[in-house]
Every structure is written in C-alpha cells, then in structure tokens.
Amino acid sequence: MADQKKQGTAKLIEVELPQSSIEQDRKQLEKTWAHAHGVLGWLMEVDHKVIGLRYIKTAFAFFLFGGIEAALMRIQLARPENHFLSPDTYNQLFTTHGTTMMFLFAVPIMTGMGIYLVPIMVGTREVAFPRLNAYGYFVYLIGGLLLYTAFILNTGPDAGWFAYVPLSGPAYSAGKRVDIWAQMITFTEISGLVGAIVIIATTFKMRAPGMTLSRMPLFVWAQLITSFMIIFAMPAVMLASGFLASDRLIDTHIFNPAEGGDAILYQHLFWFFGHPEVYIIFIPALGFISPIIITFSRRAIFGYTAMVLSLVATGFIGFGLWVHHMFATPLPQLSQSFFTAASMMIAIPSGVQIFCWIATLWGSKVHLRMPLMFVLGFFAIFILGGLTGVMLASVPLDLQIHDTFFVVAHLHYVLIGGSVFPLFGALYYWFPKWSGRMLSERLGQLNFWLMFIGFNVVFFPMHQLGLQGMPRRVYTYLPQTGWGSLNLLASIGAFILAAGVLVFLINVFWARSAGAIAGNNPWGADTLEWSTSSPPPVYVWEYLPTVEGRYALWMQNEKTPLVVGLSTTKREILSTSVVDAFPELRFEVPGASIWPAAVALATAVAFIIGIFTPWAFAVAAVLAFAALAGWFWSNPDYENVNAQNPTEAFMKPTEQPKELQPKEA
Amino acid sequence: MSSRRVIDVSGLPHHGFDTIDPVWWGNNGLLCIETSMFMITIATYFYLRQNFVTWPPPLGQLTGPLNPLPDLFFGTTNAVLLIVSVLPAVLIDVSARRNSRGAAQFGLVICLLFGVAAIVFRAYEFPAVKFRWDANAYGSIVWFILGMHLAHLLTLTLETFLLTIWCFVREFDMKHRLDITALSIYWYWVVGMWLVLYTIIYWTPRLS
C-alpha cells in the first residue's frame, strides 16, 4: 500500500502500436543491448543469458571430468587386489571426484540455470546486478581451473571432499594439496554467494507487473529459497576452510587439540554448511520438476501454496540436520535424538511435494516427453534414496554402516536421483529455448534408459556391499571378502551410465545443427520465457510483458497489457515492488565492462599466492582495492544520460488514463 | 492495426531510496552474508571456550595471572569512538536524502577520520590480547575476530574514501546519493557488530 502512495505514475492506457514503431524500437534495442565482441569482449560480457550458459557449460564440463574420475575408480574396484591405480592416485581421485561434483558441478549448474532463466521467467531483460554476476562466474572458473591444474600436477587434494581434520591438518597432510582444496572452496563459495544475491534482488525487484509473490512460478520460488539457504550456509564452509588454511599456513590452533583447539568443531562447521548444501542442490531440482509436470500434464499444479510452504519448510529444516553426519562422533545422546527427529521430519515437506505432483499428474492427459521421463525417473530413484535416508537417520543403524558403501549408495541415490535426473529433464526441457532447436526424443529415450538402468546397476549393489562391511575410500579389497562379483557388476553399471551421458552429448551436438526448429513455445508451456523467441534476442522482449495470473501464458489474452515507456537507448529495466510487483522504477543496469574480470583476477591472485605466504593478502588487498576503485570510478556511459524516449512519440492515449491496480486472479 | 492496452512507465523515476531500489537489497544481502560469518565465528569462540578450564588460559609463566584478560583500554576506546562515529554516518545519510551536498561532504570527511582512527586503535588491540595467534586456540580465535572486523573497518574506510572523492570532484547525483545511504547502513552495521564482538572479547571472560 505504501508503495502505491509513493509511486503512482505507471498508467494503464490504450495506444496504437504501429508495426513501423515496433520495428524502430526493436532495432534500437538491438543496438543498446548488443554483445561485446572479441577476446576482450568475452571478458567484458555481462548479459545474463551468456553468463548463465557459461555457468551451465562449464559446470557440465566439470561433470564429465568428475564422471571420468568415477569411471577410473570403478575400473580399480572391479576386481579384488587390482593395481590399476596406486593408493595415492585413488585418494586424489575420490577427493577430486567429490569436490568436483559438489562444488564445481552441482551448485554452479543450478546457479547457472537460475541466472539464465529467472530474469526471463519473471519478465525482465537482465539480472539486477549484471557486473557482479559476471564477477561470480570468473571467480568460479578460476577456482575450478585451480583444482584441476593441481590435480594434473599430482598435487590434487587427497583428504576427501570434506577434508576432515586432523587428517587434513598440518601434522598429517604435508605439502600443498589440502591448501588447494581450501582455496578452491573459497572461490566457489564466493561465486555461489554472489549468484544468490543476484537472484534474490532480481526475484524481489524485477518481476513483471502483476506477478505478485503468490503468482510467482515455482521454479523462481525454488531459486529464491535456495539463494537464502546459500546466504546462511556457505559462510560456515568458508570459515571452516579459512580456519583450516590458517592452521596450516600460520600455525593457528583452531582445530589443534594439543593447544585447546577442537577437531569435532571442524565437522560441525563443515556439516552446518554440508547438509544445507544437499538442499541447495536439491531445491532447484524441485524447481525444475514443477514446471515440467505442469506443462506435460496441462494442468494447474495441485496445492501451489502447499508446494511453496514445503520448499520454505525444507529450507528451514535443512539447517537442523547437520549432526546426522556426525553420529559416529561422541555427541550427547539427547542431541543425537534431536537430530534423528529433525532428519525424519524433513521427509514430510518432501512427501507433501511428491504427493502434490502425483495429484497433478493423476487423471490428466499426460504427454510423456523426455523431460517428464526424467522426472518419473527421479520419482523412482529419489524415493529409494529417501528411504535409505530415513534408515540412516536412526543412530544405531548409522553407527553400524557408517563409512561403508551403503552410504555411498544412499548419497548417490539422493543426489543423482534428486538432482541429476531432474537436471537432465530440465536440459531437455529448456535446451530448445536457449538453442532454438529440439533434442531428439529417440536418442533421448536411449539416453534415459541407459542412465536409468546403468545408475541402478552401479549403485543398487552398493547397498548390499555396505551391509557386508565394504568400507568407503579404500583403494582395494581382498578376494576372501567375497565382494568381487557385486563390485564387478557395479563397474559394468558405471559404463552403462557413462554410455547414457555420451548419448546425451551426441544428442546435443546433433541437435545444434540438425534438431527440429523449436519455435517460441514447443511444449505449450505456461511460463514467460516461452513467449519470446528461441533463442531469445539480446533484449529478450521488445516490450516487457505483464502477468494476469499464476500461469502467465495460459492466462494471457489480447487484453493483457504490455509495458511501454522504457528507454530503448539505455539499458533500462522495470523495477517493481517486492510483494505486489507494482511498477516503481526505471532501473538502469550497466553494460559490458572489464572490471568484473579484473577484480576476479585480483581475488585469484590473493587466494592463489595466499596458499604459499600470508603476505600475499596484503599485496592482493591493494590490487583488489585498485580494481574495485576502477570499477567504482569507471565512468559508465549509462549514467545521467537523458535520452529522448522514442516510444513517447507514438503513444496516443485513447482513453482516460487510470491507475494500474494489480488484479486478483 | 489495432489499439493495444499498455502500461506506460515513462513517468517513473530512475532511483528510489531504501527498499524501492534494488541496490538496497544487494547491499543488505551482502550484510546478511557477513552477519552469518560473524555469528558462526562467535559460535566457534564459545565452542572452543568449552575446552579450557580458565578462559583466557594461563600465560604459562609462574608469576603471571591465572587468566590474563585482554586490556580494556584500546578496545573500549574503539567502542566509544565507533558509537560517536554514528553521528556523522547519520549526517551523511540524511544529507544524501535531502540532496545537501555540503553537509554530505563534511560528514564524509568526518566519517573518514573516524574510520582511520578506528583502524589505528585496532592495531593496538591485537597486542592488548596477551597471546599471539599461534600461542593457543584462544589466541587464534580472538585474533580471527579482531582481524575479520578489521577487514570491515578497512573496507568501510576505503569505500568512504572513494565516495568522499566522488562527492568533491564529481556530481552529487542520485546514484551516488543512494550509494551514500548504503554506506551509512554499512557503517551502522560495522559499529553494531563491533559492540557485540567487543562485549564478547572483553567482557564475557570478565563477567563469568
């Protein structure tokens, strides 16, 4: 209400929009929003579509690397007393595999999907802070390259993706391996945090007029809640890795029991991040599933409010579970019981969502296309992973199978089932949007079944292996254990799974040149991104859309207004109020700039030299300040330019202007 | 060609104060991140304290006190200094909103002086803790807290420095007036956070 008093100048009117003016505006917008070119242009580009796709492609490349590492480990474990890999290489491989999949693949690819899709889905042209967004990508890229450069130089981290002390401490891990890991964490967490800020501000302030919070697509809700979780979870791991690095570099004693430090504290700090992390990966995946189910069942979602509240509840309860990773440490029984209860409680909101999806699908005329296939695959796999999760929440059982392959089976069922399958569904679903072409359904079927069967063949036997006592993170086992045949089966499964991913890659490369032309809305979906062309033009829309209900495109008609009056000569986007999406500002976003890359470079210098000497921070602080000052001082040509507004010329009100009010659905 | 319903937004302003502007959300989001950083650091402080019989631990010399508390002088001075510095921070906030350039310039210079003074006093706070960072877990965590807050003092002062120069040599435009209000929020946050940390470092060992 207060918003409407302050800003009452957005007017709902009727005008003539002659084709010639639309064409003229389009040409001008194309010029204003044009991409930067060349190598320097690559470093300067800030378009969220470009940055989002960079995140997605980079993260997918890391996914392939992580997969290759997994395949090498499966070859090693295929038979007892195998000497394919040395114990040291094996340690580096499982550490790099876990680190890659968690920090360089799962979180960034979800961030990337959000950065590409959220602005278009809420009906705007750019994220709120495009340069900050570009900075986040460069920091992530450098962090990933750091890890792999070290890995190739045989200094890959080898203390597990969680790097527990005392193993990772100065006494037991000499050399620089763990430091590489610690700094890589810092890089990726900075990028995650920056992405979260960008998505929160974009979601809160850039939604199309009429898209009140209660009409926001569930995908956007999922991204928003994930971003809040990132803000409160990721600082914990930055501190943990920062403390660890300083214990190793400048002899602090945070984790050193001999001087009053505490090794269990590390586990608390790590898992206070680490458990919410699972949901940071999982909630965006839930956000993929809802639009896919809505689209392919051609129905409004059953229980929208319940869905949103379940996501919020998952976000909160996700912070109350971390100790269930530490049941094998000496903790008070009362706290163990508390965390058991919380771990079981989180099954409730997940269950609510699954039932809502089933209710939406139930009795509808389901269009079983590839995205939905992957969602159905998710149901099967994730529910199994959820069930073993409830088992592991029980302390006595957990103690028995802690650090065995049962846990490996569980976590892959949850993460691949809960995250990778929906992600592949999402890639099939949105690939037409960002490439303009459809992926092949036939190759898709092959891809799905190879992945689905391969996944179960590799990970289901691990439940049994774990119950038989096979420990994790050990490079081989004796023939007498009798684990050989199940391990061989799992290794065969790994190659079936890899073949599935290979088919996906073939599909992508085939579709880029030969796929069917997608058109604006190949699936007949309801969210705004499907109303612009595929791929979207640089300015996304000639005129920003407005929204009249939860299912924007399904509720659109010829009376649905467009937004006019934004400058076409400056990068202007519309900023609206947080709850009601009432137009408030013509917010100008900056264009291409070299400063984000420069600041990322200064950050990188700080952290990489910081592996070797603490003085790096003093030097790099100066560098970072210089770069930030440059960023601040750069005279952006987007400021204080009062360009004349070309749209004004042809806007002839044909009726008495009246105040725009957001209408109820 | 037919007529078409549109929302004409050409009359909207380019900037607004507080929650209206996306910058406010970005700024406060970053402060949320830093707040979680400090909250987790504080939790670490109290977690480590459980491992000690006396906190701070004895100096290790036969003649020294059993729990060598950090000297109050510089920390307290800094706390008072920072509380007083809220006044110029309010001044720049208000003058940015009222578009009074002179008052903002004056306030920014005063803020800058306070920032530099707080950094200088902070330099003396480190030796006021009776342990080096590498002596024991107590020394480590207290140095961490002081250092993390120092990083904010530095950032705050440098940001003030940049905005001060801008206000003297460039235009006092709406975008930078907004930046000044964001700076003042950061200022309040740094001061508020110090009062919490000051109480924890200097007073919780004394009061229990």
Image (cartoon, rainbow, N blue to C red):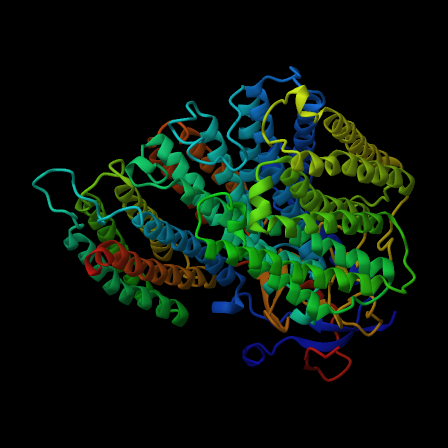
Vertical comparison of B5 with A64: above or below? below
Residue A603's x, y, as percent? Answer: 46, 38
Q: Nearer the viewer, residue A485 or B83?
A: A485
Residue A164's x, y, as percent? Answer: 47, 36
Residue A152's x, y, as percent? Answer: 57, 21
Vertical comparison of A125 with A301: above or below? above
Q: Which residue is drawn at 61% across and 77% down?
A: A9
Vertical comparison of A336 with A103: above or below? below
Q: Quadrant of residue A607?
A: top left
Left or right? Give the position of A28 relative to A45.
right
In this view, the residue farthest toward the top is: A83
Residue A544's x, y, as percent? Answer: 72, 63
Left or right? Give the position of A120 relative to A363.
left
Q: In which quarter of the image is residue A500?
A: top right
Q: Residue at x 31, y 64 (%)?
A: B89
Left or right? Give the position of A524 relative to B173.
right
Q: Residue at x 68, y 35 (%)?
A: A63
Left or right? Give the position of A332 relative to A19.
left
